[in-house]
Image: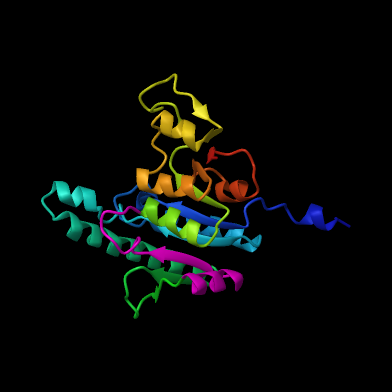
Amino acid sequence: MPTKSAATPHIKYKRIVLKLSGEVLRGKGAEAIDAATLEHICEQVKEIHALGVQVCVVIGGGNIFRGLQGAKQGVDRTTGDYMGMLATVINSLALMDCLEKMGVDTRVQSAIPMNQIAEPFIMRRAIRHLEKKRVVIFAAGTGNPYFSTDTTAALRASELHADIIMKATKVDGIYDKDPKKYADAVKYDEITFVDALRQRLNVMDSTAFSLCLDNNVPILVFNLTSEHAIRSAVLGKKIGTLVHN
C-alpha cells in the first residue's frame, strides 16, 4: 500500500500565474488558434489543476493583433493597444471553452468591462474562485494602453500573492545571448534579478521585471512544448531558467 507522500507528488508552487504568449496558440499552421495546440496547452493546465495547484492564466494576443505592430502600420498606439487587449479576450475565451469541455471549472475576468462574456477583474473574487478550485484567466491586459501582458502577469501575481510566474515559451530558458544566432550561447539554470538586469537579458519588459523584482515574485522561463512541462515546473523539477532574488 503506497504511502500518502508516495501517492501524492510534492507541489513546490501552489498558486501560479501561467503567462502564455498569444503566438503559442498558432502552432505550426497559419490559423490564429490551432485546435490541436490549444488542446495540448489545456491538457497541461488540467494536469496541474488535478494536483491541486491554483492556476491563473494570462495570455497575450499577438497571434491576432499586437499594438506595437499596428503602430508600425500607422494605427494609433492607444487604439492598437486596445485592439490587442480585445485579442487577448478572444484567446481567453478559447482557453475557457477548451478547459470546460475537459471538465475544468474556469472563469474569465476582464480588465475592461464586458459583462456579457466575462466577469470584471475583482481581486477578492479571483481569490475565491481559486479557493473553489477554478482556473482563472485574466483577459484584456491591465485595461490600459502602453502596458504589456507581461506587466499584467506581474501585476496579478503581486496582487494575488502567487508563488511564481511561469512564463511558457518556445525556448527552453534564458541564455547569455541569442542561441539561434550564437552556437556558444550558454543557458542559465537560475539567475538573480540583479544579474539579469546587469547583463540586460530579455526576460520580460522593464515594467514587468521591475514589479517582479520589487515584490519578490520569481519568474520561471521554460519550453511549453516539452512533455508535461508545466507539471514538471510546479513540482520543482529542473526545467528552464529560474529568475529570483
Q: Closest to the observer: 129 or 180?
A: 129
**Residue 49, how many percent across, how many down?**
60, 62
Q: Quadrant of the N terminus?
A: bottom right
Q: Quadrant of residue 86?
A: bottom left
Q: Closest to the observer: 57 or 125?
A: 125
**Residue 137, how many percent across, how many down?**
45, 65
Q: Is residue 12 left or right of residue 87?
A: right
Look at the image and give the residue range highlighted in magenta: 123-148
Q: Quadrant of residue 170?
A: top left
Which residue is rendered at x = 50% and y = 51% of the image? Answer: 215
Q: Which residue is outermost to the bottom?
A: 116
Q: Which residue is outermost to the front?
A: 214
Which residue is rendered at x = 44% and y = 72% of the image? Answer: 122
Q: Which residue is outermost to the left?
A: 74
**Residue 83, how many percent across, how many down?**
23, 61
- Tell me the colour scheme of the image: rainbow
